Image: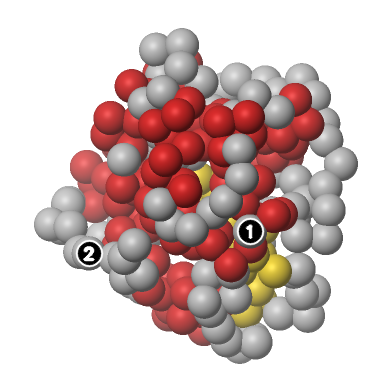
Amino acid sequence: MRTTVKKLAAVAGLAAVLALSACSGTDDAATAAAGSAVVDPTVGVAIDGAGKAVEPTHDAVVVEVFSDFLCPWCQRFETDHGDEILELAGDDRFDVRWRPVAWLDRNAGGSEYSTRTAMLLLHVAEHSPQHFWDTLVAIMDVREGGPQLTHGQLADVVAAVGVEGDLVAVQSDADLRAQVLAFSNEASSLDVRHVPWINVDGVQWEWGTEDAGSLRDAAHSALS
């Protein structure tokens, strides 16, 4: 499984901003779920420089990424900025957190792709944390045809990075489903209006604009 991300062709900033609106979320999540030290809907999933899911810290600049696996611009963000994300996650001055949501099931043809993929990611964070980033990248890589994947095929995508267990059953787990809904609810309560949505020290970083600069620069600016 690749550990670095490939660069896509540059897309004009205005086009990116316009396209982001297609990934906005309006569905309400009706259920809340309690989190754990690693998986907490009110915090997200913190990662270290190796992409492992870890407990968050509370004395560092927080970099948060809200993302839906069905969103093409979330895939582009991971591709363009994955190296920077892991670099920041390996720096003790920053606490990088991934916050999955499932807002785009309405575009998944009834397959609940956004929910199922988020369930798998949260399961991996809890039970196979060393595979968190590789799982995220692997699922992003199949996004284009994702809604057509069966439970078994999606399980195979995650198993290919080294995650063990019944990954088909994970996609029907009621507790995980409730957690995904809670993550989505929390994002809505924070006034996150579309995905990908990136906060640096509580302030939105407009990554799709022409003058956005790098995520690295935005994070380091928050240190001063």
Question: Going 52% across and 76% down the picture, which residue do you hit?
Answer: 50
Expressed as whole percent of the image width and height from the top left, the position of residue 217 reads 43, 80
Please state which of residues 41 and 222 is positioned toward the viewer in this rendering.
41
- Identified by mark 1, the residue type is Ser
Residue projecting furthest to the right: 34
| In the foreground, 163 or 224 | 163
Quarter location, residue 161: bottom left
Q: Label 1's element? A: loop
- What amino acid is at disc 2? Lys
Q: Position of residue 4 (x, y in %)?
A: 32, 70
Of callouts 2 and 1, which one flags the residue occurring earlier in the amino acid sequence?
A: 2
Task: State the colouring used for the structure image.
Answer: secondary structure
Q: Provide the secondary structure element on which disc 2 rests.
A: loop
Residue at coordinates 47% horizontally, 54% vertically from top-left? 135
Task: State which quarter of the image contains the N terminus.
Answer: bottom left
Q: Which residue is mark 2?
A: 6
Residue 29 image point, x, y percent: 70, 23
Give percent across and percent down for residue 214: 36, 73
Residue 209 is drawn in which quadrant?
bottom left
Whether label 2 touches label 1, CB < 8 Å: no
Total residue callouts: 2
Residue sitting nearer the eye, 141 or 173: 173
Label 1: which residue?
128
Q: Is residue 108 above or below residue 161?
A: above
Q: Is residue 136 visible?
A: no
